[in-house]
Image (cartoon, rainbow, N blue to C red):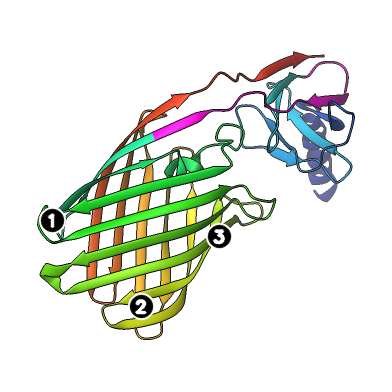
Amino acid sequence: MKKSLLLILFLLSVVLHSQSKEYSGIVRDISKTPLPGVRVTIKGTQINTETNFDGYFKITIPNSLDILTFSAIGMQNLDYKVGINKNIEILLEEFSTETKFLDIGLIYDSPNSIFGASMSNGIDIQPLAHFEELRTDFLYKLSGQTNFKNDYTFKTNLSLNYPNRHLNIASIEFSQKNLYSKHLFYRDLSLIGSTYLRFSNIALVLKIGHQKFNKQNNFGTSIGLQKIHPNIYYGFQFGYYSDYFNYLGFIKGFLLEDKVGFNIVYEKINNFEFFNFGLSFIFVKSSTNDIILTN
C-alpha cells in the first residue's frame, strides 16, 4: 500500500511538472546595468516574482500561458512572449512620457450638512494605479466644504509619490474645521507616510502631527492599515492626541475605471462625527503603451 502511494505521488509530480515550464534570466536597463526589484508577473494571473540584487529571476509558467510582464518604478512596462529559449535577457527602457490625472470631486458631509468640492492630480487613486501609470513625483489635493453660513472645512495635501523603495507615499497635510453651530474649532498639521507590507496588498500608514482642538493644543500620532484590491481600497486609522482619540475609516475606488470614482469616509474627533460621501470625475491624458516582445 505504501509503495503504491509513493508511486502515485511520483507519477502525479511528473504530470504536474510536464504541465509547466521554468524560465530564468536577467533584467537590465539600456546601459546593460542589472535592475534589482523588477516585478516579473505571469500575465493574467497573480503569480509573480522579483529580480534579485543582480537582476536575476526564475519563474515557472503553466503551459497554457506564455506572456511575462516586467514592471519597475520609472521604467516602461514590457510584455515578453516566451518560447523555446528558457534563458531570457530583458532590457527595460525609461518612460519618455507620463500619464496625467485630474480628479474633480463633489463631497457631502451628512451629519453636519455641509457640501463641497475637491481637486487633485490623482492622490486618491494612487493606491490603485501602478507606479508606471501614475509617475507624477508630486501629488496634491485641495478640498473644501461649507453650509454657506458660518460652518466650513478645508484640507490641503502635498505628497511625494514613491520617494524611495521603502515608502510608497510621503505627505504633509493641513486641515481646518470651523463648525460654529456645534462649537468646534479644529486645526491639524501632520506628516504622513505609508509603506506596503512585504508580500501583501496591505499598506501600513503612520501619521504624526499637531492638532488644535478648541482650546487644546496637542501633539499625537495615528496608525492605520489599508487593504488594496484591483478597483477598490479601504482602511482605518486610530490616533491619540494627549486628551482625546481620533478614528478614521474609509472606502474608496472606481465606479467606472479611470472615469468615475467614489469615496466614503467616516471620521470621529473626540465626540464630533463627520460622514462624507463623494463622487469624483477623473480625466486622464496618456500616450504611453506597453511594449510587447517575443523570442
Q: Amino acid at mark 2?
A: Phe
Q: Over which residues does the magenta segment extend?
A: 82-102
Q: Along the horizontal axis of the image, is 42 left or right of 154?
A: right
Q: Amino acid at mark 3?
A: Gly
Secondary element under disc 1, as helix, strand or loop, is loop
Do we see residue 127 in this rendering?
A: no
Of residues 124 and 85, the one drawn nearer to the viewer in this rendering: 124
Q: Which mark is residue 193?
A: 3
Q: Vertical placement of 71 versus 53: above or below?
A: above
Of labels 1 and 2, earlier in sequence is 1
Q: Quadrant of residue 11?
A: top right
Q: Amino acid at mark 1?
A: Ser
Of labels 2 and 3, earlier in sequence is 3
Q: Residue 202, percent across and down?
A: 54, 54
Q: Does the magenta segment cover residue 239?
A: no
Q: Residues within 10 Å of mark 1 (few under 14, many from 20)?
A: some
Q: Residue 119, percent across and down?
A: 35, 41
Q: Residue 9, percent across and down?
A: 79, 41
Q: Nearer the viewer, mark 1 or mark 2?
A: 1
Gap between marks 2 and 3 measured at Cα: 20 Å
Residue located beneath label 1 in the image: 113
Of labels 1 and 3, earlier in sequence is 1
Q: Residue furthest top?
A: 294
Q: Which mark is residue 226?
A: none
Q: Residue at x 52, y 51 (%)?
A: 159
Q: Along the horizontal axis of the image, is 200 left or right of 22?
A: left
Q: Vertical placement of 13 versus 259: above or below?
A: below
Secondary element under disc 2, as helix, strand or loop, is strand
Gap between marks 1 and 2 measured at Cα: 23 Å
Q: Vertical placement of 174 versus 132: above or below?
A: below
Q: Residue 27, percent across and down?
A: 83, 32
Q: Nearer the viewer, mark 2 or mark 3?
A: 3
